[in-house]
């Protein structure tokens, strides 16, 4: 297989991405706009061809005008000497019920002529096939039901795919419920609309709880899977009997369990050997555990595995593992909390036991935004998506022997240049008064105002390219360019079961870093703002109530409260057991003292900082028992975004949330207002909040 392009053809094929990249670079000198951060081009799912000469990957970018995302499949020579070739539309990106984009991996045909992938196009999830020479794409697995998974036979002649209930049946059941009334039971997410209120598989669907905690699925998602096959030569289709279906991928449950909890595994394609990463408990948090081991099994029944005993692999936070093709080497990735979640890749020779460093980065080198995703791999090289806090994603080739890095494709080059000029970032390391270490990515304020600048802080996780912290709502680079220093803090490593200790550790991280930065004159300790998603929202309100540090705050997720308990308790034991484990809470009448400690409902009088709440429609009802009192007291402003899940993803909503957070902290930390007439109403209300706070302080001081 050989791909040759004239210079004109290469320009034509790259035109959409080049145009988008050029647009992303248009902004005021020294500024990075919220729109630029929303329109970052993400790269995902690099897959190397069987001969190692090419890599297929997908680009994904927000379209604010159409309020959707575009995705495109590309192929490129893995040596990087030719530009990528645009192959086909990748469809609407699929998401989990929390709003996170799911990876879509390309499967190469054995002869390297085709790639196969799942795509949501025209309301259907099907398997598509595209010719690698760019001559065209077509749907292969066309079905009345959406395709859940697929695989190719070894000879590449047959494609097998699985389906559940048909789209027509799902829609019919939804409509029948609508017509007859929806019976409320433990599976119904009652904290949101009960009819087609959430996005699943590319459309608004009626949802039910499935899996763990608050994961959601569509109606009939429990329909037994059926397998079908397409002969790729004759195009004949047939149903597969259960015994003809492809075997399920090897799972942790298939392996001996006595050595600990299997976290990651990879099976060698040709001889079946298994590389696995094991930790000493089932916490589900690989970066928190000290007992981590890397093994190789000869087969699933092997009870005498080879163990990596080198210092470079023992008790390291290993987050992905893969076999190097045609070798006895295992490649593994370490994501180091002590280095701000920076990733490094190592090569373990199973034969000799030696471990060599392949490369060390200051950010992510993975298969996309997910730090646990894997790179594409050939015998000679890895192809990874690289990204740092202040440099957006790009595709890189990494030589496995020398560690040499080469950029293959950088669709965000213009934005990277703007960021380098406007918002350079540095990694901070510090410890609190108890010696607990922390790390964070610091964006110094770049606008020269008089005196030290204000500081905005978000707390949770800060891996890869930082747009707006975890959940992407606080435009860190835009804040820095507007004169507000910004800091993203990684939560402290270690599994802490007690909720008060977790929250206090977050508060201690913030108080100690404010002291550090203020003592060096880099920030003004009297003007500190904070925001966060999920656990970050919890720590934000806890800090607002248990410290006098914050001048303003912004949250996007509900916190534990009686209303949250009421809604969640319908799930029964699945909810109640999680509540006890994570927050040490029983029903409010059984553990009233613990509720008074943890729930903001019981300490509203201690929250003095004004609170901006920008919440998804799927969750805001949980928060009304403390949000409404704060609104009535003019101490909070609440916005709800329709049809949004835990992590909001609609491009227009993200721009609106970014911009409002920028306005909010500009108002409370710097005393500035945007002169845009369309924003007049928000400032009228915020000024009334400020006046109410001044009046309350005067009343308190007179007592």
Image (spheres, rainbow, N blue to C red):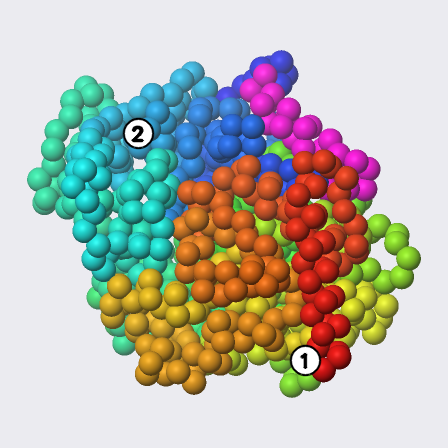
Residue 347: image location, x then y, percent: 51, 59
Q: Please state which of residues 84 and 39 is positioned toward the viewer in this rendering.
A: 39
Residue 302: image location, x then y, percent: 25, 68
Residue under the image location 36 percent in, 32 percent down: 119
Magenta span: predominant SS is helix
Screen quadrant of the N terminus = top left
Q: Report whether residue 396 is seen.
A: no
Residue 458: image location, x then y, percent: 62, 61
Q: Reply above or below: 443 against 703.
A: above
Residue under the image location 88 percent in, 52 percent down: 448
Indicate which disc, 2 or 1, sits on the residue closer to the N terminus. 2
Q: Please state which of residues 166 and 428 is positioned toward the viewer in this rendering.
A: 166
At label 2, counting other C-alpha atoms closer than 10 Å, the crowd grade (few under 14, some 14-19, many 20 or more) is some
Left or right: residue 685 compared with residue 379: right
Q: Reply above or below: 688 against 316.
A: above
CA–CA distance in space, label 2 to label 1 = 52 Å
Q: Please state which of residues 548 and 210 is positioned toward the viewer in this rendering.
A: 548
Q: Is residue 249 magenta?
A: no
- The residue pinned by badge 2 equals 124
Residue 654: image location, x then y, percent: 56, 43
- The residue pinned by badge 1 equals 432
Q: Secondary structure at mark 1?
A: loop
Residue under the image location 69 percent in, 48 percent down: 684
Q: Residue 17 shows which numbered tag? A: none
Q: Is residue 14 magenta?
A: yes
Q: From which residue to which does the magenta span run?
A: 12-32
Q: Secondary structure at mark 2?
A: strand
Q: Please state which of residues 383 and 514 is positioned toward the viewer in this rendering.
A: 514
């Amino acid at each position: 297989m050989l791909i040759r392009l004239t210079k004109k053809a290469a320009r034509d094929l790259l035109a959409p991405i080049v145009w988008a990249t050029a647009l992303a670079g248009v902004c005021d000198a020294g500024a990075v706009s919220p729109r630029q951060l929303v329109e970052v081009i993400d790269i995902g799912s690099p897959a190397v061809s069987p001969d190692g000469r090419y890599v297929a990957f997908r680009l994904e970018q927000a379209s604010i005008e159409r309020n959707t995302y575009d995705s495109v499949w590309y192929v490129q020579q893995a040596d990087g000497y030719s530009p990528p070739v645009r192959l086909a539309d990748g469809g609407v990106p699929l998401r989990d019920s929390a709003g996170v984009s799911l990876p879509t991996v390309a499967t190469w045909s054995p002869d390297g002529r085709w790639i196969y992938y799942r795509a949501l196009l025209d309301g259907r999830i099907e398997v598509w096939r595209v010719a690698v020479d760019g001559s065209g794409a077509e749907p292969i697995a066309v079905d009345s039901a959406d395709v859940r998974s697929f695989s190719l036979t070894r000879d590449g002649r047959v494609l097998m795919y699985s389906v559940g209930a048909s789209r027509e049946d799902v829609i019919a059941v939804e409509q029948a419920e609508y017509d007859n009334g929806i019976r409320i039971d433990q599976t119904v997410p009652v904290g949101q609309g009960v009819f087609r209120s959430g996005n699943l598989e590319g459309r608004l669907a009626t949802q039910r709880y499935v899996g763990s905690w608050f994961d959601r699925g569509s109606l009939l998602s429990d329909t037994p899977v059926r397998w079908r096959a397409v002969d790729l030569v004759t195009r004949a289709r047939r149903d597969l009997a259960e015994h003809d279906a492809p075997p399920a991928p090897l799972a942790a449950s298939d392996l001996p369990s006595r050595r600990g909890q299997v976290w990651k595994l990879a099976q060698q394609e040709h001889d079946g050997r298994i590389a696995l990463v094991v930790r000493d408990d089932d916490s589900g948090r690989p970066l928190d555990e000290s007992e981590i081991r890397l093994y190789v099994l000869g087969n699933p029944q092997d009870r005498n595995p080879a163990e990596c005993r080198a210092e470079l692999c023992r008790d390291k936070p290993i987050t992905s593992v893969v076999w190097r093709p045609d070798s006895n080497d295992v490649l593994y990735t370490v994501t180091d909390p002590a280095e701000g979640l920076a990733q490094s890749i190592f090569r373990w020779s199973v034969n000799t036991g030696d471990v060599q460093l392949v490369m060390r980065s200051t950010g992510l080198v993975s298969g996309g935004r997910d730090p646990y995703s894997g790179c594409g791999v050939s015998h000679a090289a890895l192809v990874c998506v690289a990204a740092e806090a202040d440099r957006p994603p790009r595709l890189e080739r990494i030589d496995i022997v020398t560690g040499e890095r080469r950029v293959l494709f950088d669709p965000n080059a213009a934005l990277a240049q703007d960021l380098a000029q406007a918002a350079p970032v540095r990694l901070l390391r510090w410890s609190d008064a108890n010696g607990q270490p922390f790390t964070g990515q610091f964006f110094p304020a770049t606008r020269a105002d008089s005196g030290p600048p204000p500081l905005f802080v978000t707390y949770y996780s800060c891996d890869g390219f930082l747009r707006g912290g975890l959940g992407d709502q606080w435009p860190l680079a835009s804040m820095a360019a507007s004169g507000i220093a910004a800091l993203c803090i990684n939560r402290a490593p270690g599994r802490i079961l007690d909720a008060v200790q977790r929250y206090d550790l977050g508060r201690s991280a913030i108080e100690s870093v404010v002291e550090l930065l203020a003592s060096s004159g880099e920030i003004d300790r009297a003007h500190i703002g904070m925001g966060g998603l999920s656990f970050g929202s919890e720590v934000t309100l806890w800090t607002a109530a248990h410290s006098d540090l914050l001048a303003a705050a912004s949250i996007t997720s509900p916190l534990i409260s009686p209303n949250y308990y009421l809604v969640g308790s319908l799930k029964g034991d699945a909810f109640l057991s999680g509540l006890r484990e994570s927050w040490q809470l029983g029903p409010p009448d059984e553990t009233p003292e613990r509720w008074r400690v943890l729930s903001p409902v019981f300490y509203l009088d201690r929250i003095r900082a004004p609170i901006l709440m920008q919440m998804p429609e799927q969750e805001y009802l949980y928060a009304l028992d403390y949000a409404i009192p704060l609104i009535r007291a003019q101490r909070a402003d609440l916005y709800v975004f329709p049809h949004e899940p835990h992590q909001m993803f609609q491009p227009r909503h993200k721009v609106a949330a970014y911009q409002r957070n920028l306005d909010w902290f500009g108002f409370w930390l710097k005393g500035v207002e945007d002169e845009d007439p369309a924003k007049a109403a928000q400032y009228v209300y915020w000024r009334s909040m400020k006046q109410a706070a001044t009046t309350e302080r005067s009343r308190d001081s007179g007592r």
